[in-house]
Structure formats: C-alpha cells, structure tokens
Image (tube, grey):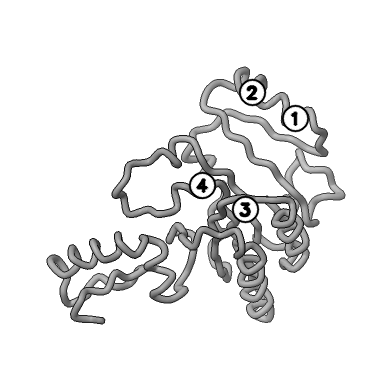
Amino acid sequence: MFLTGPDEEFVPEHLRGQLAIVVVMVFTGPEAGARIAMAPMMGHGHLAEMIAEMPYADLNSSFDDPAGMRNYYSAEYLFDLPDEAIDRVCARAGDMVVPSSSAIAMARQGGAVGDGPSGYPVPWRAASWIIHPLGIWDDPADDERMITFTHNLCGDVAEWATGSVYLNFIGDEGRARTIAGFGADNYERLVAVKDQYDPDNVFHHNHNIEPSLAR
C-alpha cells in the first residue's frame, strides 16, 4: 500500500505524515510461525515493522475509513502486474493528498479465491492482482484532485484489466460498471430473480440490479 506514514511509535519520525510504502502480510497461526513464514520478505530491508497477533476482524477493521471524511474509491482487477504497471502506480502515488487517509492498495489474488465454484456471480476470481485507489480526505477544495487521481490511476492500468470488479470497492460508476461487477450472464440471471421478488425496484439504493420493467 501507498499511504501517509502514521503517527505511531513504530514508525520513524521522518516518515510520519509523509508518503510511504507499507507491506501488509497476514499469517493464520501463532506469531512464531508467522516470523518463520515471513522471514524471506523481512530480509529485504525495511525502516519499520509491527508484528502482532490479533483477531482477523480487528485486522480488517484497522483499514476502515475515519468517520466524517470525504471519499471516492474505485478498483481494477488485473490479469498481470508487469513492471510497467508497477511504475505507473508508483508514479501516480504522488498525486494523492498527503497527509491524508488516502491510500493505494495493491493486493495479490489467487489460491482458493481463484479456484472458486463455477456459476457464482463473481467474475473477478481469475484476476491475479487488484489495484484499489482509496481517496479519503477532509478539504472540499481537494475534491476534484482526488476524484481525478482515482480515475487516472484506474486508467493507468486499464490495459491489463479484466473488466470485472468487486462492487464493494467502487461507488456509483454507472449501470455498465455494475453489470461488469456481476458479469453479463450472471446479471441477467439476477434480473430474473429481481423480476420475481422486487419487480417495482423498491430495493435500489445499491449497485442496482434493475428489474425488466425498469429498463
């Protein structure tokens, strides 16, 4: 992740409030096992570290948005992450508002996710990487800057994108993007369910699956 260095004891003072790169590693098991598994990565050299046992829910919620902030998100799922794509992401990180709660998450995918069941309405399982810009800021004067930053970063990696997306990672990007989140065939299957249970589109405050009558 690219983010603003947090004001934490384990972070060197010269990185606090500055653009920094953080590598988040998760190990399911006791700390002793984690240190063995993570040893190769830890051997590359770094300026700070924090290793701790915690419930998974606590880890996940540690990345939640601070309350009351302005935000604009998007994401792209990639077939590959070549050096050129990495260079583009690194160059774009300088466009974020720093300091702020904004971040660029670059997450590896695969394993059990890639081996998921067929017919499930999630078309991004085969992607190998996720690029997830999270614009989070507090000054309305930065609105255009951060929205543009998000769009530009997604555009930077578009040539490697699968075209599908996890809908929880984006805001309202239009009907076509919602369909891409489910997959075109899956979306039509879900329309049939919507036609049966909600033909009047009462439940529409989401990435909406429009019933046939609404189209």
User: In the drawing, what numbered circle is on residue 42?
Assistant: 1
Whole-number angstrom distance, CA of label 2 to CA of label 1: 10 Å
The secondary element bearing badge 4 is classed as: helix
Give the class, few, some or many, for how many residues have Cα within 10 Å of label 1's Cα (few <14, many ≥20).
few
**Above-or-below relation of 20 to 142:** above
Write down the residue under mark 2.
37
Query: What is the three-letter code of the residue carrying label 1?
Result: Met
44 vs 177, nearest the viewer: 177
Looking at the rendered structure, the secondary structure element under dot 3 is strand
The residue pinned by badge 4 equals 61
- Left of 40 or right of it: where is 58? left
In the drawing, what numbered circle is on residue 105? 3
N-terminal of the pair, mark 3 or mark 4, is 4
Query: Based on the displayed image, in which of its 4 quarters is residue 178 positioned?
Result: bottom left
Q: CA distance from mark 2 to mark 4?
A: 24 Å
Lower position in the chain sequence, tag 3 or tag 1: 1
